[in-house]
């Protein structure tokens, strides 16, 4: 077993860690898109009283929120699975089956 916890995590799950970073880099900037859409809804569509443009922006806003929520969910489930697999791989044999299930 490696001397450092970080080294153990990297050695046991480097491939998944890279996917986790890439997914995070996709999800993080997506927080700006709804803010920009809200600004455009208020400044452009409502001020110009263009109902068609308002529905287009609101529909886009809804799709972006659903996509962003779905990607956040996938990110959290993937992260949780990665933590679970890594912690099970680090578990030492114990006398009680309730301490570790990596037998």
Image (tube, rainbow, N blue to C red):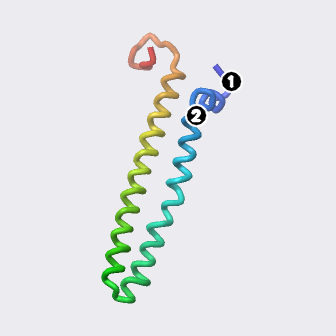
Horizontal and vertical percent position of residue 23: 52, 47
Q: Residue at x 40, y 78 (%)?
A: 41
Q: Nearer the viewer, residue 89 or 62?
A: 62
Q: Secondary structure at mark 2?
A: helix
Local crowd size for mark 1, using a 10 Å CA cut-off: few (<14), some (14–19), many (≥20): few
Q: Is residue 83 left or right of residue 48?
A: right
Q: Residue at x 62, y 32 (%)?
A: 10
Q: Residue at x 66, y 22 (%)?
A: 2
Q: Indicate which disc, 2 or 1, sits on the residue closer to the N terminus.
A: 1
For the N terminus, which image quadrant? top right
Q: Is residue 62 left or right of residue 32?
A: left
Please tell me whether mark 2 or mark 1 is closer to you in this view.
Answer: 2
Horizontal and vertical percent position of residue 5: 63, 29
Q: Is residue 65 left or right of residue 10?
A: left
Label 2 sits on residue: 15
Q: Nearer the viewer, residue 33 or 83?
A: 33
Query: Among all residues in the image, which is located at the extreme right?
Result: 3
Horizontal and vertical percent position of residue 85: 48, 28
Label 1 sits on residue: 3
| Count of number-bearing discs | 2
Q: Quadrant of residue 78?
A: top left
Query: Among all residues in the image, which is located at the extreme bottom?
Result: 48
Horizontal and vertical percent position of residue 89: 52, 22
Q: Is residue 41 above or below residue 94?
A: below
Q: Secondary structure at mark 1?
A: loop
Local crowd size for mark 2, using a 10 Å CA cut-off: few (<14), some (14–19), many (≥20): few
Q: Residue at x 47, y 13 (%)?
A: 94
Q: CA distance from mark 2 to mark 1?
A: 20 Å
């Amino acid at each position: 077993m490696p001397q450092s916890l970080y080294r153990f995590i990297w050695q046991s799950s480097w491939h998944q860690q890279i996917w986790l970073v890439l997914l995070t880099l996709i999800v993080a900037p997506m927080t700006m898109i709804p803010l920009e859409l809200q600004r455009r809804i208020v400044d452009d569509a409502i001020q110009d009283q263009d109902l068609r443009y308002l529905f287009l922006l609101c529909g886009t806003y809804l799709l972006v929120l659903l996509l962003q929520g779905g990607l956040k969910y996938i990110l959290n489930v993937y992260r949780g699975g990665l933590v679970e697999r890594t912690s099970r791989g680090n578990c030492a044999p114990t006398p009680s089956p309730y301490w570790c299930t990596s037998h």
